[in-house]
Image: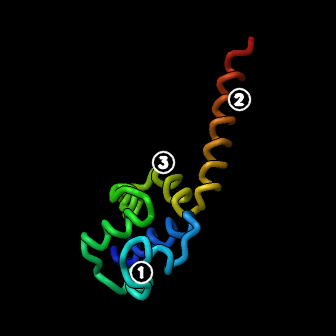
Amino acid sequence: MRLVEKLGNRIRLIRKEKGLSQEQLAEVSGLHTNYIGAIERGEKNVTVESLEKVSLGLGITMDELFRYIDPMLQKDELTTLVELLNERSESDRKMALSLLSQVFQWEAEKHKMP
């Protein structure tokens, strides 16, 4: 998958997590709706200025926009976990974090018992 496609998928994911339509994102970003659609489909080589407008419209930093776009080449358990979580909604990620926290707490308590 090309970088512009990965970036478009990331923008679409964040937009949907924020509950925004393409029209709403276009309005708050000061960009045309067709342009937002083309970015999300990976059809446009978007400028840095436009990416800044999109990130501001999404209410995120440029760092957050590019985070997890290109996973590390060497696959380990942590990289795999990040990739899995990246494909899920914010509520799913929060649920997974809560579950992991409970498992780690249970493990810690289990090892404290005589």
Q: Earlier in the sequence, mark 2 or mark 1?
A: 1
Q: Is residue 18 left or right of residue 98?
A: left
* Vertical order, 75 against 50 (above or below): above
Q: Residue at x 39, y 84 (%)?
A: 32
Q: Which mark is residue 47?
A: none
On-image quarter of the C terminus: top right
Q: Earlier in the sequence, mark 3 or mark 2?
A: 3
The nearer-to-camera label among 2 and 1 is: 1
Q: Which residue is mark 3?
A: 78
Q: Residues within 10 Å of mark 3 (few under 14, many from 20)?
A: few
Image position, residue 63 (x, y; %):
34, 55
Q: Quadrant of residue 3?
A: bottom left
Q: Which residue is mark 1?
A: 36
Of 110 and 23, which appears nearest the observer?
A: 23
The nearer-to-camera label among 1 and 3 is: 1
Image position, residue 1 (x, y; %):
39, 77
Of 86 and 58, which appears nearest the observer?
A: 58
